Image (cartoon, helix red, strand yellow):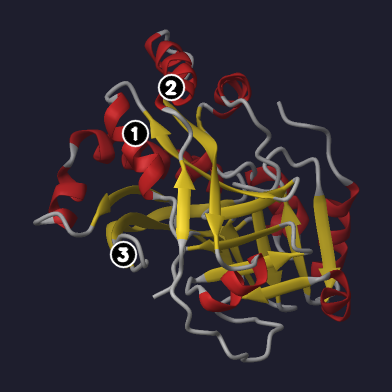
Amino acid sequence: MFPPYHQNFDLMDELSQQKVPFFFMVDFLMENVEVFQENEINKNSLLIDFQNFKNIKEVEAGNQEIDLKVFSESEGNYRKGFDFVKENLRLGNSYLTNYTVKSEIEINLTLKEIFYRSRAKYKVWYKDQFVFFSPETFVEIIGDQIYTHPMKGTIDASIENAAEILKNDVKEKAEHYTVVDLLRNDLSMVADDVQLDEFQRIDFIKTQQKNLYAMSSKISGKLKPAFQNKIGSIMKTLLPAGSILGAPKPKTLEIILEAENYERGFYTGVCGWFDGENLDSCVMIRFIEKENGKLFFKSGGGITHLSKFADEYKEMKNKIYVPIH
């Protein structure tokens, strides 16, 4: 289904069995797997700011006004991929497809300045190639328990009763149910006693341009003996992340690769920090990448048979923001 295994998954298994701390990044197609032990992180132009790990010192963030210009993917180009996805949904080849595009942006900050000034649950800057500020946890491992937190569904927080509208919107609800079901099935490949602990939690995301509500759920299980202390094997089994791919995974990946006219690269991949005992990882979304001197913001959303073009195009644009406030 996906590219053959990468040897660094084995390295991740070895390090986690030896309880050696490390940071890892896996791109969307699992073709590039980067692993950095703690003493290697600073040598590799890598800045990390996670909840439980950071390799940065507090620096003066600066206070100049942010000037962000967005040149969104045109409606015509977006519609080509959208219509292809909808046709495959109609044919029953997929029942949820996460369709994304890249939009050129201009901003009066460097990628490193964006990293330092933005606020997010997970932030990474890498070799001045990309920066991301993700709100979405992928999996956490604490002892022999594994948790995942699929995030699906966003809405402009300024809309009256926005949180209730989001929770009760037929399309958003169906999409969220699908992702929760997919992640519950995925987790059951590596864990027993899988259960849904929290459903349709609403989180507030503050940005300079527009505040958003996002909908998440929490699923947990007990790691099977074959996967305990094997971070690489767990990632190899669970990736690509269901929330940014869709279902069923194999056919939906084929649809995405044909619908999207660019390569995602590390966008929608996964990265994480293993501290020698426990793991915290995130989905690499809210992602700005430098290509040939220009900056591109990669964004998208889940498409179902209930999706309307105008709503999905708007959601894709809503997700183009920098959380500096």
Q: Pointer 3: what residue?
A: 203
Residue 280 image offset from top left, x and y in percent: 60, 69
Mark 2 highlights which residue? 82
Q: Secondary structure at mark 1?
A: helix
Ranked by sequence position, the earlier of labels 1 and 3 is: 3
10 Å crowding of disc 3: few (<14), some (14-19), many (20+): some
Label 1 sits on residue? 312
Contact check, label 2 and label 1, Cβ < 8 Å:
yes
Going from the N terminus, do you reach mark 3 or mark 2 first? Answer: 2
Q: CA distance from mark 1 to mark 3?
A: 20 Å
At 69% from the left edge and 71% from the top edge, which residue is drawn? Answer: 273
Q: Is residue 41 left or right of residue 248?
A: right
Lateral position of residue 99 relative to residue 311, left or right: right
x, y percent for residue 292: 76, 45
Nearer the observer, 154 or 3 = 154
Residue 140, compared with residue 6, is above or below; it is below
Task: Specify the quadrant of the image occupied by residue 157.
Answer: bottom left
Q: Position of residue 269 (x, y in %)?
A: 64, 48
Separation of residues labelled 3 and 2 (CA atoms): 27 Å
